[in-house]
Amino acid sequence: MKTEIANIKKTRTGADALVLPVINGGKGDRLNSIDRALKGMIKKVIKDRPSISDAGNTEILHIKEKGLPGIILLVGVGDVKKTGLDELRAAGGSAFSALARYEPQVVALAADDLLQKKVDHIPFVEGFMLRNYSYDRYRSVNNKKAVRTFRIDGKHNKKVESRIKELSEITEAVHFARDLVNTPSNDLIPSDLAREARRMEGGKMKVKVMGKKDIIRAGMNAFYSVAKGSKEAPRFITLEYKGKKGPGIALVGKAITFDSGGISLKPSEGMEKMKYDMAGGAVVLGVMRAVSRLKLPVNLIGVIPSCENLPGGAASKPGDVVKTAGGKTIEIVNTDAEGRLILADAIEYTKKLSPEVIIDIATLTGACAVALGNEAIAAMGNDQKYIEKLMKSSAATGEKVWQMPLYKEYRDYIKSEVADIKNSGGRSGSLVTAGYFLKEFAGDTPWIHLDIASTAWTDKDRPYMPKGATGIGVRLLVDLVAEVSK
Ligand code: BES
Ligand code: MN
Ligand code: ZN
């Protein structure tokens, strides 16, 4: 979708559909002038349904008058002095979904009334753009036409153009991550992720891909112990973006392209969703893409260990013991706790690249949903200063993050009788014991763990996230990286 700015001012915008924000009580010059052209139709709707001005409510009007768009969508934005950033984003998303069934090609947003009230309308635009996504790769019929042009109509200051451009890059990165996550595992294997990484190579971006032999040679036996159950070859992908001198942030993304559980096999019900177990890796690719396209003056490393977790004659068995590249031994008591195995090696590898902080992002535990439902990312770490920065990015992007504790008492839960550590502490506290396991491998390096198991996928449409892969984490981490670079 092309997003453009314009200052048309007339009722005629050249669009198939016009989005008209309704501020509390239906005040605003633009609304009034369109209402006059419609002989009071809008004021009547507002009178009949006063709640239309509540943030996120919508009403479609079919217009016969010549010179006006065929569809006018009223969308409530509430008392704009009080409406929160994410409410405005959600209203933008709701506007898109209310329009989608009419398949308009060109949509205009009448932004003047918001601008006149000095309301930042960009979050609304963002919500609209984020919601304009569907995954149609395998549909042979009934493809919905997406909006081609989104025209933001109003008297804008100069900054808006660059903010829209920035927004477009970030939204594209979110959609790119969603595409990867939605793709089933027969069409997305580790080498496909490596290919996507390679496509970003060039300029300030370097990409390195290690295959099975390199992984074994590097001593990444914990990672390999997961990979070896599948015929598909693993890939260990490293992207390095150098936008300045000095150290930078490192992102590590879990990319299990399918998680069957291995020998500790998962129940078949719902197993089809385990194609999304590579969402962490997809987020890392999305962030790298946005940051390099925005040419941010930062250093950023992306590390993506990728493989399948399958049962088979060569698969790891419960009770097996493996040694990581850093020399720690792990007892694999449950082959379904594979994410932390591949991340243990990946975190140790990343430490050697001397980043100022490591942030891993992973669909790590089912317990994440037990603790937080499908609303928030669980965060844990050993560096409160960085967690505070992350919280700021969370507030700015609306991607909710909730911190969980890593009390030293949890160490006992993952004590092994035969090795340095075991890969599962059982049901109790399993969201935090997974985090604690990773902490042991991060050591003294500042580190944050983000569990996106319950938020990377949504079973219901959300205001700016349609059903399926959400791409959550991309906007959060791009914001963090951008803020740290300031
Ligand atoms: N990929 C899963 C976690 C997951 C579950 C992600 C549901 C998305 C939705 C992870 O590899 C896993 O299987 N974790 C186990 C760990 C347990 C065996 C200690 C879990 O949480 O059940
Ligand atoms: Mn698993
Ligand atoms: Zn998994």
Image (cartoon, helix red, strand yellow):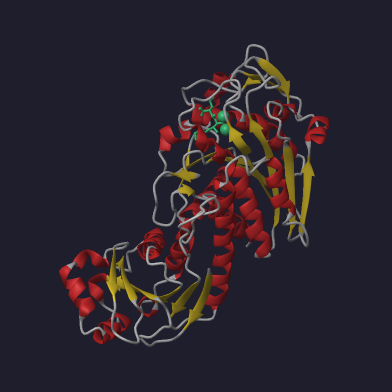
Measured from the top left, where is residue 376 in percent x and y?
Answer: 44, 44
- Residue at horizontal 50 percent and vertical 79 percent from the top: 5
Asked whether 342 or 381 is in front, the reply is: 342
Residue 130, placed above or below residue 104: above
Asked whether 156 or 453 is in front, the reply is: 453
Residue 102, placed above or below residue 456: below
Q: Which residue lies furthest to the front in this view?
A: 141
Location of residue 416 (image quadrant): top right
Name the side, left or right, on which 431 lies relative to 249: left
Name the side, left or right, on which 209 lies relative to 365: right
Residue 411, placed above or below residue 137: above
Measured from the top left, where is residue 45 in percent x and y?
Answer: 20, 72
Measured from the top left, where is residue 265 in percent x and y?
Answer: 55, 23
- Residue at horizontal 62 percent and vertical 62 percent from the top: 486
Q: How many numbered discs sit on the rendered protein?
A: 0
Q: Residue furthest left?
A: 48
Measured from the top left, where is residue 171 in percent x and y?
Answer: 54, 61
Q: Is residue 407 visible?
A: no
- Residue at horizontal 28 percent and vertical 72 percent from the top: 61
Q: Is residue 250 visible?
A: yes
